[in-house]
Each structure stands twice: as C-alpha cells, then as structure tokens.
Amino acid sequence: MLTHSEISNFNKYGFLIKRMYLAESCLDEMQHVAVHHLENHISPIEFEADLKYPGAPDSSNAPGGKTSRRLLQAYARDLSFQRWAKNHTLGENLRQLFATKNDLFLSQCHHNCVMTKAKTYSSATLWHQDNRYWSFEEENLVSVWLALGDENKKNGCLYVIPGSHRLEIHPERFNEALFLKNNDVQNELLIKNAEAAELQKGDVLFFHSRLFHAAERNNTSETKLSVVFTYHESGNNPIIGSRSAEQPSIQISRASKSDK
Ligand SMILES: O=C(O)CCC(=O)C(=O)O
C-alpha cells in the first residue's frame, strides 16, 4: 500500500514514482511481446510520421517513415499486458490515489499502448496535459507509465512540472494543437520548474491527467519501451459520443462489499 506521504505528494505534485514495482519476469514477458509485435508490424501502430512531432520523419516514404511511436491497443494485444493492467497491487494503489472505494476502469481509448521511442527517428513531445483531447465528466484520470527498460535524459524520459495539474492556464498560452506555446514568458517560467522523471526498468510513474509533461527524442542506439495505461473511477464517465467513449472501459478493480 502507498504511505500517507506518497499519497499527499501525489496530490501536491501530480505524480509519484514507485521503484521496482513489478517482477523482472513480468517485465521481460511484456518486453518480449512488444519487440515481437514491433518486428512483425502488428497493427494498430501509430507511426512517428503520422504525428510529425519535432524530429519525426516527414512522411511514411521518408527514411525512417515506418518508425513506430506507439503500439496501440496494448490491453487487447496480449495476456501479459492484461495481467499488468489488472494487477491487484496496482488497483489498490490507484484506489488510494483516487481516494475512492468505487470501482476503477481502464480506458481503452487513451494511452493503452506501448510507447516505443526508437533510435534515430523518434520525436520530441512538447509540453501538454493529456486531458486536452480527452472527454470525461471530470478531468481526473491517472496514467500509469511502466518502464520496461531504463529511461533517462539521453533516451527521452518524460519531464514533468510538479504541481502543474492544479494550475489554470489561460487559453492564449497554448498553440492550436494545445501544446504550451514557445516564446511565451510565462510558459518559459513555468517550464523552468520541470524535473526529469528518470526511471529504471520496473519503476512506475503515476501521473495525473492534468499534469504538464513533455519528452525529448531518444539519442541512444536502443529503442525505449514503456507500457502506459490510463484509469478512471466509475463515477467519472467518458462523454457519450466523444472519442473517449469509442470503446468501453474495462473494469479492473472491484471494491469488495466490506469496503462499500
Ligand atoms: O514519450 C513521449 O514522447 C511523451 C509521450 C506523451 O507525453 C504522451 O503520449 O502523452
């Protein structure tokens, strides 16, 4: 179980890192599946060239044009991902972070992926909040980022701005794609507070859906793999008709009767 201080740090800073969260054998199993799916181009895959974030190939015909950014629909890909998504300790920890005894659900529509930051052709992701394209009754979701290998400044680990999930940012400070604008003095001041969320294999980063985060390209010769799932409470439903409701959420943790 998480301690009181871990929970209060999550509430204050919008993220929490838990070290050595999962057994090596489970990590290796997911890594093995991810590599197999990458090598065999098993769809659905989001390619770097689809999004064209900074550093990505210009088109799918350009060199590196078939570089994966994310293996989508991780939950449906393999039992190893399903076991992790429904891991009992993870469910209990999430219920602590949501401060709820309600049932929890995994969104199949958001993240639900293996992030694949490849050598040479990976892109940088600018400062954003994940909620920007998500439609739920409340902006209160938690993502769980599991490192299948080490993540550091060289290979494009996430950077986070502690406490930024609590900020209200004026719409003028965002560009059309809802990233924080460059050349904005207030944004520059905010970004100065960023911290690198460096992880080792098996570490987990929990982060709130309003937390500002970003990442650099992978400047090493090895692809970085991370499994990312996003959870919401039973009372916080996706808005009907929105992209967030395109696929049903999956129940992962049923509150026991004695808890209710
Ligand atoms: O690894 C990255 O480039 C960041 C990914 C990210 O922040 C996201 O997909 O929301």
Image (cartoon, grey):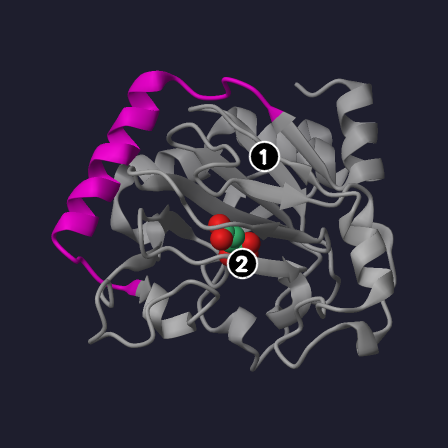
- Choose top left, top right, bottom left or bottom right for residue 258: top right
Spatial CA distance of label 1 from label 2 is: 17 Å
Magenta stretch: residue 24 in it?
A: yes
Residue type beneath disc 2? Thr
Residue 260 visible in image: no
- Horizontal arrangement in the rendering, residue 87 relative to residue 31 (left or right): right
Instruction: Between label 1 and label 2, give the one nearer the viewer.
Output: 2
Q: Which residue is mark 1?
A: 205
Task: Report the residue that reaches farthest toward the left.
Answer: 40
- Residue 236 position, x and y percent, is 69, 59
- Horizontal arrangement in the rendering, residue 70 relative to residue 165 (left or right): left
Circle 2 Cα neighbour tier, 10 Å, few/some/many (<14 / 14–19 / ≥20): some
- Residue 110 position, x and y percent, is 50, 60
Residue type beneath disc 1? Leu
Q: Is mark 2 within 8 Å of ligand 1?
A: yes
- Choose top left, top right, bottom left or bottom right for residue 91: top right
Q: Earlier in the sequence, mark 1 or mark 2?
A: 2
- Residue 253 position, x and y percent, is 55, 38
Provide the residue span drawn in magenta: 18-45
Q: How many marks?
A: 2
Q: Which residue is mark 2?
A: 125
Q: Is mark 1 within 8 Å of ligand 1?
A: no
Instruction: State the residue in front, 38 or 90.
Output: 38
